[in-house]
Image: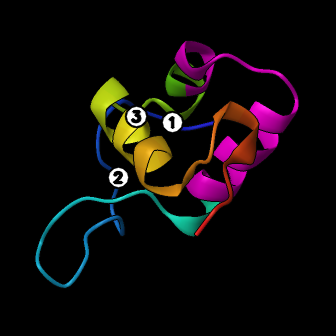
């Protein structure tokens, strides 16, 4: 899916911090719903484990309760 590891152009917010795009979040939602493991999603999106785990902690109610926000 992603072309290279790490942050991508256009992923900076107004404060200069990198973040997941809405497309990334929707991908996470779909892949979790399809039964993918979190590690497999991390590899697919080529994002750091901390980025994905923080996103899930913020927006998930259990593994299957994640909703892209």
Residue identified by numbered label 2: 8
Q: Label 1 to label 3, Cα distance in Å?
A: 21 Å
The magenta-colored residue range is 24-41
Task: Return the x and y of residue 8 as percentages of the image width and height.
Answer: 35, 52
Residue drawn at point x = 66 percent, y = 16 percent: 37
- Circle 3 packing at 10 Å, graded few (<14), some (14-19), many (20+), is some
Left or right, residue 68 beside residue 48: right
Query: In the depicted view, which residue is nearer to us: 43 or 37?
Result: 37
| 61 up-or-down from 14: above or below | above
Sequence-earlier tag: 1 or 3: 1
Instruction: Look at the image and name its color scheme.
Output: rainbow
- Circle 1 packing at 10 Å, graded few (<14), some (14-19), many (20+), is few
- Circle 2 packing at 10 Å, graded few (<14), some (14-19), many (20+), is some
Sequence-earlier tag: 2 or 1: 1
- Give the structural element (helix, strand or loop) at label 3: helix
Query: In the depicted view, which residue is nearer to us: 19 or 68?
Result: 68
| 2 up-or-down from 68: above or below | above
Q: Label 2 to label 1, Cα distance in Å?
A: 9 Å
Task: Return the x and y of residue 38 as percentages of the image width and height.
Answer: 57, 21
Quarter occupied by residue 11: bottom left
Secondary structure mostly seen in the magenta stretch: helix
């Amino acid at each position: 899916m992603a072309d290279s590891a790490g942050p991508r152009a256009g992923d900076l917010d107004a404060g200069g911090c990198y973040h997941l795009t809405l497309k990334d979040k929707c991908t996470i939602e779909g892949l979790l719903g399809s039964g993918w493991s979190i590690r497999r999603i991390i590899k697919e999106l080529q994002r750091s484990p901390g980025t994905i785990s923080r996103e899930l902690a913020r927006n998930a109610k259990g593994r299957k309760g994640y909703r892209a926000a």
